[in-house]
Image (spheres, rainbow, N blue to C red):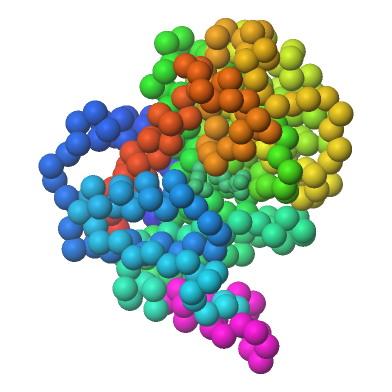
């Protein structure tokens, strides 16, 4: 593994999940990150990603530097050949090269603009760091994906898989703001690599990118999708078709206990942060059905497995 930008950077998902779970149950003594530095750049807010990745790096013995790049750094120019006489003070060419002098791994969070689909799909920020840095790049959630979250979700589902092939439903839920499709995309991708029966439930107009969905069953009736589900993964995303828009939805898609009745007493997951009683009702989040805290805890071990792999591969 040279970078961790997409799920396709994982060569052996089973082995990575196994390694993460082994480090969770039996914290290793050795510090493969001793003398190495992780630099993290955030162009957007974060609680879990920032702190779990820092914790993971420290568990490996690494030093950590974090920067709120949007607030504290120079505004970056990404365009090749730009005449920089306006508001952008520094080009990514210098920024990424300089960071590579200080860091052994660079991790970046950069959400989509959600205005121009083609532009977002070029993953300009992540790919520019990859192009101009000389050290591995980790995606902390980009325009189209959140692979550390997806690895976490795969670990969490494997921890509670009593069944050989659980039924997993990824359901859209309401949210007042336009959110990226990144979490839903990466979750869909990682579930396609696991032994699960995946169904995606979303209102009309909210179908995810067909290049990512492939042949996964999409249901526009949430109640029907929930039947006999073992795991319900709740997440909002803005429309892919009417790109970045929050569309009018008539039915109630908030997930509550009444809706879980149709399921096989499903465990409920969400990447967090979650808006209570808009996305998921209190009666689930405060119940035994919710595993969102266990899920968030696994962020540390997912990041630890990825950073360890990158350290090994860049030796
Ligand atoms: C972000 C999103 O939906 O992509 C981050 C989730 C991990 N969520 C919000 O902005 C609320
Ligand atoms: N799930 C997740 O990525 O949370 P943060 O946005 O708080 O990092």
Decide: is 240 above or below 278. Answer: below
* Residue at screen point 62% across, 15% down: 257
Res 235 → quadrant: top right
Quadrant location of the C terminus? bottom left
* Residue at screen point 39% across, 55% down: 2
Decide: is 209 above or below 221. Answer: below
| Spot occupied by residue 119 in the image (x, y as percentages of width and height) | 72, 61
Q: Is residue 66 left or right of residue 224?
A: left
Seen from the viewer's position, the closer of residues 151 and 27 is 27
Res 311 → quadrant: bottom left
Q: Residue furthest bottom?
A: 85
Residue 90 visible within the image: yes
Decide: is 62 above or below 20. Answer: below
Q: What stretch of residues is rendered in magenta?
A: 78-97
Seen from the viewer's position, the closer of residues 181 and 47 is 47
Q: Residue furthest left?
A: 29
* Residue at screen point 58% across, 20% down: 283
Q: Which secondary structure type mostly characterizes the magenta part of the structure?
A: loop
| Spot occupied by residue 47 in the image (x, y as percentages of width and height) | 46, 49
Residue 81 counted in the magenta span: yes
Q: Is residue 35 left or right of residue 286?
A: left
| Spot occupied by residue 233 in the image (x, y as percentages of width and height) | 58, 27
Q: Is residue 119 left or right of residue 39?
A: right
Q: How many marks?
A: 0
Decide: is 284 above or below 5. Answer: above
Residue 215 visible within the image: no
* Residue at screen point 52% across, 80% down: 74
Seen from the viewer's position, the closer of residues 76 and 268 is 268
């Amino acid at each position: 593994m040279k970078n961790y930008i997409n799920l396709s950077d994982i060569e052996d998902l089973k082995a990575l999940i196994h390694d993460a779970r082994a480090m969770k149950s039996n914290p290793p003594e050795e510090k493969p990150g001793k003398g190495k530095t992780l630099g993290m750049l955030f162009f957007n807010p974060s609680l879990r990603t920032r702190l779990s990745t820092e914790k993971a790096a420290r568990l490996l013995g690494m030093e950590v530097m974090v920067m709120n790049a949007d607030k504290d750094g120079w505004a970056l120019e990404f365009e090749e050949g730009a005449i920089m006489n306006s508001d952008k003070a520094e080009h990514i060419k210098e920024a990424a090269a300089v960071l590579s002098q200080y860091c052994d791994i660079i991790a970046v969070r950069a959400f989509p603009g959600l205005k121009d689909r083609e532009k977002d799909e070029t993953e300009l920020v992540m790919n520019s760091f990859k192009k101009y840095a000389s050290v591995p790049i980790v995606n902390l959630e980009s325009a189209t994906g959140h692979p550390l979250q997806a690895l976490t979700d795969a670990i969490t589902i494997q921890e509670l898989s009593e069944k050989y092939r659980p039924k997993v439903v990824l359901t859209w839920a309401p949210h007042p703001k336009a959110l990226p499709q990144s979490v839903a995309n990466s979750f869909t991708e990682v579930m396609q690599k696991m032994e699960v029966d995946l169904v995606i439930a979303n209102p009309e107009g909210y179908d995810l990118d067909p290049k990512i969905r492939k042949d996964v069953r999409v249901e526009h009736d949430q109640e029907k999708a929930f039947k006999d589900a073992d795991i319900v993964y709740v997440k909002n995303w803005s429309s892919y078709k009417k790109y970045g828009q929050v569309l009018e939805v008539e039915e109630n898609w908030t997930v509550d206990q009444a809706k879980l009745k149709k399921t096989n007493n499903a465990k409920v997951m969400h990447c967090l942060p979650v808006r209570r009683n808009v996305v998921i009702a209190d009666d689930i989040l405060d119940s035994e059905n919710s595993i969102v805290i266990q899920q968030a805890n696994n962020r540390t071990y997912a990041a630890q497995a990825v950073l360890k792999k990158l350290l090994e591969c860049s030796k």
